[in-house]
Image (tube, helix red, strand yellow):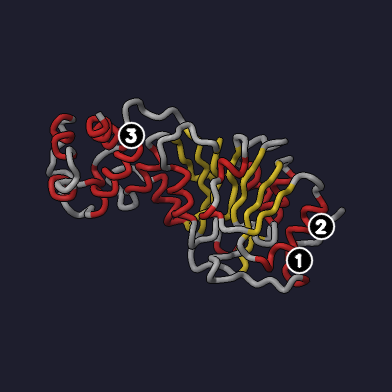
Amino acid sequence: MNLPPLREVIATHGLSASKALGQNFLFDEQLLDRIAAIPEDLSDQAVLEIGPGPGGLTRALLRAGARVTAIERDSRCIPALAEVQQAFPGKLRVLEDDALKLDHAELMGEPFAVAANLPYNIGTLLFTRWMSGQTWPPAWTSLTLMFQQEVAQRIVAKPGTGAYGRLAVLAQWRAVPKLAMKVHRSAFTPPPKVMSAIIHVEPTAAPEGVTAKVLERLTEAAFGQRRKMLRQSLKGLPGALDALATCNIDPTRRAETLSVEEFVAVARVMSA
């Protein structure tokens, strides 16, 4: 079954991008195929897609051979996705649900890649959730995610830069995030006010002796008042200042000057 062009699908089903749901639609099939190629070989791989909308990236993932589970909150998009289901029998499962309320590992029941043009209003929240928690390696094998470019830059940022913060440490202490592709605002309908970028993340071995919760609390406190010296921002966190001393880290430094490795070292002492 040949699927009609995405613009036709939008017109047929009377779909307009919902601002409330953070939607922006991508129609360029070549661009979508390039995005689906970022995780490399997807043939017969389980892939979780959040916010497929009318199914542009969904089609590209299916063309790449993936078995896709798509979670879509917007009931208006379900008929368009049903057409994609018919075109790829047995390869697409569509759930009309809220991705924030589901246990993704339980839902998938096997190792899975995540690929999504994330709705802008829940992107950071979902990313933080995938990168958090003590269980590691995670159930997901890779994340290929579209963000606003500013958020993407915060994920891959290096110490000492304005973009470096909690998100960078969370993404980099036991995974390797890369900026895979920039996407011009004109590629979307309607065009967002900002540029977008795609981040690809693969998990690595977690450093030993570090509790994820401790590292999360440490970075939250340190970057919560990033203009302040660490001796100020961390004084309310039990054991943090002693851990700085143990690691020979000057307490007059500011959070954005500490490397990911230094945060891990402090969290290791606090975890013990």
Q: Which residue is mark 1?
A: 9
Please identify the quadrant where the C terminus is shown: top left
Q: Nearer the viewer, mark 1 or mark 3?
A: 3
Residue 3, labelled with which disc?
Answer: 2
Q: Residue at x 16, y 48 (%)?
A: 236
Sequence-wise first label, 2 or 3: 2
Q: Is residue 173 visible?
A: yes
Q: Residues within 10 Å of mark 2 (few under 14, many from 20)?
A: few
Q: Mark 2: which secondary structure?
A: loop
Amino acid type shown at disc 3: Thr
Residue 153: image location, x then y, percent? 42, 50
Considering only vertical position in the picture, is 258 above or below 21?
above
Q: Are marks 2 and 1 in contact (CB under 8 Å)?
A: yes
Which residue carries the number 3 mark? 211
Image mark count: 3
The structure residue drawn at horizontal position 69% and vertical position 46%, both measured from the top left corner, is: 68
Q: Position of residue 208 (x, y in %)?
A: 35, 25
Question: Among all residues in the image, which is located at the extreme right?
Answer: 1
